[in-house]
Amino acid sequence: MILEQIKAANIEAIKTKDQTARALYSVLLNKLKLEEINKRQAGASLTDGDAAHILQKASKELCEERDNYAKVGNKEMAEEISKQIVLVEKYLPKMLSREEIKNIILSLSDRSVPAVMKHFKQNYQGACDMRLVSEVLKEV
């Protein structure tokens, strides 16, 4: 599970005194634990799909932060955040390509928009961009 991998990486960062990784893993663990608590209150448990969604959101936030530092000329912080982005992306699942999405859609018996979107949300959450699924579905 992604949560367990990040916990192990956090411990390793503590041992190696890697402050950049340590700061990132602390933030990620806090976000994941908060989501886990919210899920538990709703009677569910945290899935890898949920964790992947949180990591994708964190990666997007870091990219925006890096771009802002680059705009103001703070290259040192931009480079540090780039390192953090690489660390986050290491835990993200491989995203489905346009061709893979098209093949999955063609293999479905019901190709209506709600049915296809529901199928991808249930089976490929965190492994595909839902906007891309929508675009490919319109082409098919």
Image (spheres, rainbow, N blue to C red):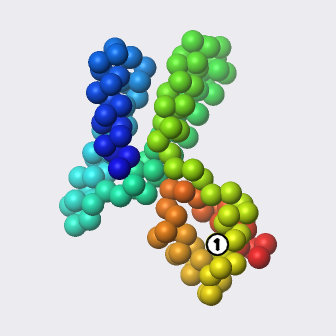
Q: Residue furthest bottom?
A: 109
Q: How many numbered circles are shown? A: 1
Q: Residues within 10 Å of mark 1 (few under 14, many from 20)?
A: few
**Where does residue 34 sit, x and y in percent of width and height?**
28, 47
Q: Quadrant of residue 3?
A: top left
Residue at (63, 57) in percent of width and height: 96
Can residue 31 be seen from the camera position used here? no
Residue at (75, 73) in percent of width and height: 138
Residue at (50, 56) in percent of width and height: 126
**Is disc 1 placed on a helix, strand or loop?**
helix
- Quarter of the picture containing the C terminus is bottom right
Q: Judge by depth and name the residue closer to the eye, 121 or 11.
A: 11
Residue located beneath label 1 in the image: 104
**Where does residue 101 sit, x and y in percent of width and height?**
66, 66
Q: Is residue 108 left or right of residue 51?
A: right
Can residue 115 be seen from the camera position used here? yes
**Where does residue 123 sit, x and y in percent of width and height?**
49, 69
Q: Which amino acid, by three-letter code, is at mark 1?
A: Ile
Q: Judge by depth and name the residue closer to the eye, 138 or 5.
A: 5
Please tell me whether residue 129 is drawn above or below residue 8 in the rendered image: below
Q: Is residue 13 left or right of residue 60?
A: left
Residue at (20, 61) in percent of width and height: 41
**Where does residue 135 sit, x and y in percent of width and height?**
72, 66
Q: Is residue 37 left or right of residue 53?
A: left
Q: Residue furthest right?
A: 139
